[in-house]
Amino acid sequence: MSKLLEQINSELETKETVPLANLMSQITSKVNKIQKSDYLKFGLVPIYDQGDNDVSGYSNDVSNAYNGKLPVVIFGDHTLRLKRISSPFFLGADGNQLIEPLDENILDRNYFYYLLLSKKPRSYGYERHFKYLKEVEVKVPNLPTQKKIAEILSAYDAKIENNNLIIKKLEATAQTLFDEWFVNFKFPGYEKVKFVDSEMGEIPDGWNIKNVLDVIERISPGKKYDNKSASPSGRVPILDQGASGFIGYHDDEPGVIASINNPVVIFTNHTCYYRILTEPFSCIQNVLPYVGKNGYDTFFVYFLTKEKIKMSEYKGHWPEFEQQVFVMPIPEIANQFSKMAKVFIEKIVSCEKENVSLKSQRDLLLAKLI
């Protein structure tokens, strides 16, 4: 690594500084954009936009997906999010700039992404930032050196992406198991159970119709934090209402104590995200934590309640959340599921922790190599 750093520094001494506008091209043709209202939860072709999520939605319109030269980079004009896209896709309709190197004999496509990641401008709030990106002055090493740098950094991102795929598969498997037991009523021993009529159709004998408040308990979030009180690093994460999950950290006492044996679920009141937390955390306003009660384990109530209320507009959704009713199993069956769900969540948490470490290592190298 030290030899590579010496080589980079030596090469850059002979290079002139140029604005990014001279090195990149904005792609305006062959790009079909999709309105957010038309995003699908599942589908054949991913949709990327300037939001926090890696993939924001899906479409099944395979024939109209972008299929130009790849990879390309999406730059979020308002959010400064950067995403490298390496397979056919659709673009979200608002605030996205699709860009690529102007000349691949000068700038490698993968190095281009890491160059942007290293040199992107600071945020000016909810302003369009593409004009500032084009003004950024850079030096670039020779093409073989660029490819070597991109190869080193891409190895970290490949591992992160693999972990993300594992996380998605684990989440999908746990959700499928929940649906099989508690929606399709194919729980262990169901063959021997009598089914009876209820206001929600036929349900297993001994099960009941319950309101969500019968099985969950709101807990105090402790001291509330905001963007001004959040630091980029620290001991305790601060949960917010965005898709990324948190705004930063602090080093005070955590507002909520959580662990793998005593998890806590949070509902974001305005944006309707659900997360299960297994480590201490704090919250901003309108992040509402809860746990299971009356014999129902928190792992169970997480899968019971998550994604049941969707964001309709930017308003408080908790009153709507309180009106949910469910067909509730006896606690013994619910907690049998919880034991299995805990194993899935433990593996997910392990992958997420590894990703945090991998991103940190990658960013340290990014600062040295570019």
Image (spheres, helix red, strand yellow):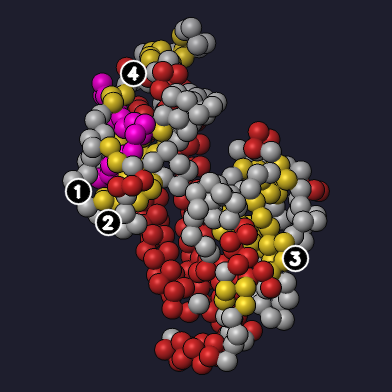
Q: Is residue 192 visible?
A: no
Q: Residues within 10 Å of mark 3 (few under 14, many from 20)?
A: few
Residue located 45% across and 41% down the image? 242
Horizontal relation, residue 260 to residue 97: left or right: left
Q: Earlier in the sequence, mark 4 or mark 2?
A: 4
Q: What stretch is highlighted in magenta?
A: 279-295
Q: Which residue in the protein does label 3 denote?
A: 69
Residue located 50% across and 69% down the image? 118
Marker disc for residue 42: none
Q: Could you tell me how far apart the alpha carbons at marks 2 and 1 are, in whole angstroms?
A: 9 Å
Q: How crowded is mark 2: few (under 14 residues within 10 Å), some or many (20 or more)?
A: few
Label 1 residue SS: loop
Marker disc for residue 234: 2
Q: What residue type is labelled 3?
A: Lys
Vertical side of 19 occupied by 6: above or below:
below
Q: Which amino acid does label 4 sit on?
A: Leu
Q: What residue type is labelled 1?
A: Asp
